[in-house]
Amino acid sequence: MEATNLNWHKAPGEPVKLDETVLEIATDKVDSEFPSTSEGVVEEILFKENDVVPIGAVIARIRTGTEETVNVQPAAPTPAREPEAQIAVPESSPQQRKESYGGGRFYSPLVLNIAANEGVSMTELEAIPGTGNDGRVTKKDILQYVADRKSASGTAQQQSQVPAKQQNNINIENKEDEAALPQPYFGENVEIIELDRMRKLIAKHMVDSKHTSPHVTSFTEADVTNMVLWRNKVKKEFEKRENEKITFTPLFIEAVIKCLKKYPWLNSSLHQDKLIVKKDINIGMATALPSGNLIVPVIKNADQLNLVGLTRKVNGLANAARMNKLKPDDTTGGSFTITNVGTFGSLMGTPIINQPQVAILAVGAIKKRPVVIESEQGDAIAIRHMMYLSLSYDHRIIDGALGATFLNAIARELENFNPDREF
């Protein structure tokens, strides 16, 4: 629906080449660079840095060598001589647009979520004047409406509790009181760090998820010895033949895909009182960034890929995330998420659901442990590669029986890994 201008790479009067980066923008998930689709001189910049810009808004004009003014549109590149091209935020997918209509007006999932959390009815929502493209209600619009409503309610309550002769001064006095409030004291030997934009958004999404879904987490463990030994056996040949390093992540995804086909409710989302079961299996993989923040790129139609294809996708998205090269579309449309808490040594975790999904799987560190195994000769103690798995799920939709059954199905898939398989 909108994006924030982060950083202009060009100023008015500066030349720009074809495909040269003009600016950086930030959506609620990723930062993206926008290239110029024409060559010339930047004539005018219409939005400042940190301005929130709706889809379709022209934000800059370029003077070409033909004395023609051109507006660039990276989302849908146009010839340099076309006078009405635009530099714009890429539009949401058709699936997102279909899910976000209320009456005859478009509302983004974010706006609808804020409205639901703040108790804003659809009648109120339709009455809010939108500042977005085609009069759409933006995040800024709905938040301003909520703030104004709370302010009006608070003022009316205060005025009902003070004498009439004091009511004319109440707003001024409140502002003076707010300015006079003491700042919190954190102690002397501290370092105060302002959270960056992504960390603030992650914090908000995590709180929103807990408010939206009643979380339940189930745990199990799996003997992944066959899988570990197979990977150790083939990883050099795999890298030599495919020019890709094979990690455990595509093997985990492979097992999850098989189980999602058996238990499709885990591959769904809830919209009001309707369960939306997704036919496409789009796997999100939580990835840690060098900054310490977290992002979830998505492997679209993961069930249509073989192990080599999954490996290429996993490595490609992980590298793009670490180099800040993900595109907005790379982080949308997920239907189920996997987070590898074992990457940093954790044995298990209680992950928070990535809304609007209904479940998320955490895989822990693989450790060698002595365990009791059954054989034809009887029980024996052996050194095995063991791993804990944990599944957090939305208890509005997924009951404990289904959640535990699905989780144990994944464990059995990993334990029954074929050590003689080809890749």
Image (cartoon, helix red, strand yellow):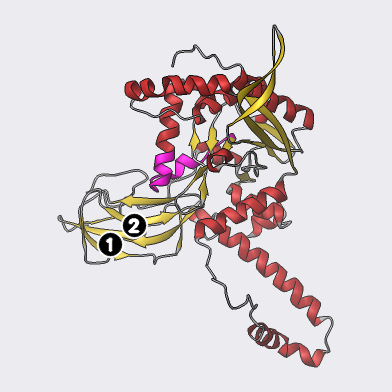
Gap in angstroms between the C-alphas marked 2 and 1: 7 Å
User: Residue 268: in sight, yes or no?
Assistant: no
Residue 137 occupies quadrant = bottom right
Residue located beneath label 2 in the image = 23
- Is 408 situated above or below 179? above
- Out of 200 and 98, give the one closest to the viewer: 200
Where disc 2 sits, the SS reads strand
Residue located farthest toward the bottom when viewing the structure as drawn: 165
Tell me whether circle 2 and circle 1 mark residues in contact (CB < 8 Å): yes
SS for tag 1?
A: loop
* Residue found 54% across the figure and 71% down from its top: 191
Asked if residue 322 is among those painted magenta in the image, a careful observer would answer yes
- Which residue in the rendered view is the most extreme toward the left? 65
Q: Nearer the viewer, residue 86 or 366?
A: 366
Along the viewing direction, whichever of 339 and 284 lies nearer the viewer: 339
Q: Residue at left 43%, top 27%?
A: 246
* Boundaries of the magenta span: 318-336
Q: Which mark is on residue 10?
A: 1
Of labels 2 and 1, earlier in sequence is 1
- What's the amino acid at mark 1? Lys
